[in-house]
Image (cartoon, grey):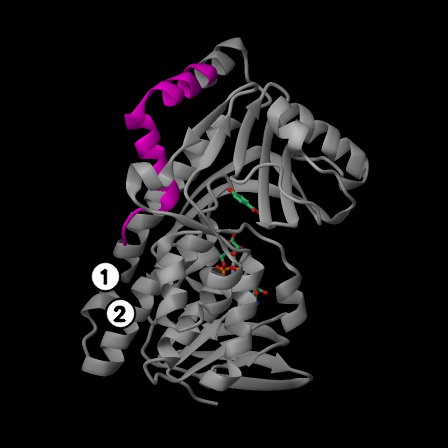
Amino acid sequence: MRTQVAIVGAGPAGLLLGHLLRAEGIDVVVLERQSADYVLSRIRAGVLERVTTDLMTRLGLDARMRAEGLPHDGFNLADGDRLIHIDIAGLTGKQVMVYGQTEVTRDLMDAAPARGLEIIYGAKDVALHDIDGDAPWISFTRGDKKERLDARFIAGCDGFHGPSRKAIPASVGKVFERVYPFGWLGILADVPPCNHELIYANHERGFALASMRSATRSRYYVQVPADEKVEDWPDERVWDELAIRLGPDAAAHMVRGPSIEKSIAPLRSFVFEPMAYGSLFLAGDAAHIVPPTGAKGLNLAASDVAYLSDALIRFFRANDGNDIGDYSRKALARVWKAERFSWSLTSLMHRFPDTDAFDRAMQIAELSYVASSKAMQTAIAENYAGLPL
Ligand code: APR
Ligand code: PHB
């Protein structure tokens, strides 16, 4: 099999890139290890920046997002008893869109057949070959048949654990990493949200987040130790902890109900440089991870593919390889700013195991400064809404 761009991974990065290239008539094949149902069963954050909603609009795949998504003008930070409102719209003129990553993925998946975007699900043993030349290829297994996909370029959109990043020689790459000593226990429940906007709470007992998927479906998180077992958190314990950490006002409006999903996710900051090597480009979680505080993961995947698709389109249209050579530098410049924001909001809002009275006092002082300073609120709002491309 031969194509122009072989994409590894059918998460949001791979699917968005595939559609953007197909829209320009470029041949693409996407190889995904899992089944379509498995990909849709993964629950991730749900706050979209303008860069992401713009790409869905450019593809003409924004109808359901516009109908079912919830545009938000702001969000809240809580410091134990009060809410500090961050007025994104008032401070930046922008909004964010609350629409689950699962729904974005579903919209991209559903549109694939009609747009000639070929996705091979259940592609096992994907391995990259000859990426340092201009005729890279991929070997993989479909069923029990070994197959070969030749391409001009490979886009590694295969998440943190995929093979693409590992195909780059260790002598070329540089890893920057911070693993946080805690995780987020998340629950999804069919109950109305406790507040019309998100609440990120810093409580003495640890962080909590009130989020949502719709007017009738809520998503909540509590910070837990890194080695915590989900079995030790029956629903009532989660609700009790949320009621304490989110503060009395949110607790008064919180409707409890049985969880329909409950899991613990670790928190990590990670950047791999460079994001390109030979004929291979990395995009999304394959190149970088942010902790979920600030919901930047999907939005960074979107900005990566915005840069990468433009560069590839110029290459195939005008035979101009300049943008391709600049992809890694351009993408990393935005990645690092989002890494900084996610790390800084994580540091401000969580209880670290070795937090002493001084550290706690610094967090409280910073939150009171945010509460009283329009400059601080503006800085937070412009990062949360998304920095320009
Ligand atoms: N072969 C083929 N596909 C693979 C392989 C492999 N060996 N390994 C991983 N994949 C697939 C995964 O099954 C997954 O569907 O690559 C896809 C990567 O998707 P994501 O992990 O969703 O990553 P990405 O598309 O970069 O999206 C970034 O997703 O992980 C969240 O928080 C992250 O919101 C961010 C967004
Ligand atoms: C979510 O709704 O799942 C969510 C929202 C905001 C975040 C992280 C997760 O920062």
Kind of element beneath mark 1? helix
Taking the magenta stretch, the answer to whether it contains residue 385 is yes
User: Residue 1, image x and y in percent?
Assistant: 48, 90
**Residue with the mark numbered 1:** 326
Kind of element beneath mark 2? helix
- Which of the pair 19/320 is nearer the observer? 19
Residue at mark 1 to residue at mark 2: CA–CA distance: 8 Å
Respond yes or no on whether mark 2 lies under 8 Å from ligand 1. no
Query: Where is the C terminus found, in terms of image quarters?
Result: bottom left
User: Residue 97, image x and y in percent?
Assistant: 45, 52
Q: Circles 1 and 2: CB distance less than 8 Å? A: yes
Left or right, 40 with reference to 325: right
User: Residue 171, image x and y in percent?
Assistant: 38, 54
Residue located 23% across and 65% down the image: 325
> For residue 247, which quarter of the picture?
top right
Magenta residues: mostly which secondary structure? Answer: helix
Mark 1 vs 2, N-terminal side: 2
Q: Which numbered disc covers residue 336?
A: none
Residue located 41% across and 70% down the image: 17
In the rendered structure, which segment of residues is drawn in magenta? 364-389
**Residue with the mark numbered 2:** 311
Left or right, 223 with reference to 312: right
Whether residue 170 is visible here, answered yes or no, is no
Taking the magenta stretch, the answer to whether it contains residue 248 is no
Whether residue 89 is visible here, answered yes or no, is yes
Give the answer, above or below, for where 169 lies relative to 210. Answer: below
